[in-house]
Image (cartoon, rainbow, N blue to C red):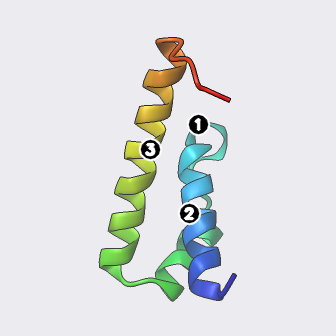
Amino acid sequence: FNPKERAALELVEAITLVSVAQVPDEIYDQATANLSTDEVSAIEWLAVVINTWNRIAISSRYPVKA
């Protein structure tokens, strides 16, 4: 992955695990160094939406096909 892709992935992972360690400053700093403000905002929203869908599927016991 290039630095921009790596920063995006690390930010999504940190948002997913926000209850464990918040979003560490070094990950946020890396994101803002490699991504525009609009890209950071879009990535944050995408992470929140995807995590919401996952939590709804998990809590409702939604069956996932093999």
Residue kind at label 3, given as amino acid type:
Ile
Residue kind at label 1, given as amino acid type:
Ser
Residue 2 spot, x, y in % from top left: 66, 87
Judging depth in this view, the residue of 38 and 27 nearest the camera is 38
Q: Earlier in the sequence, mark 2 or mark 1?
A: 2
Q: Earlier in the sequence, mark 2 or mark 3?
A: 2
Separation of residues labelled 2 and 3 (CA atoms)? 14 Å
Name the residue at 47% across, 12% down: 60
Label 1 sits on residue: 19
Residue kind at label 2, given as amino acid type:
Leu
Separation of residues labelled 2 and 1 (CA atoms)? 14 Å
- Residue 45 lies left or right of residue 59; in this view the side is left
Separation of residues labelled 1 and 3 (CA atoms)? 16 Å
Judging depth in this view, the residue of 32 and 12 nearest the camera is 12
Label 3 sits on residue: 50
Label 2 sits on residue: 11
SS category of the residue bearing label 2 = helix
Residue 57 spot, x, y in % from top left: 48, 23
Name the residue at 54% across, 69% down: 28
Write down the quadrant of residue 64 in the picture.
Answer: top right
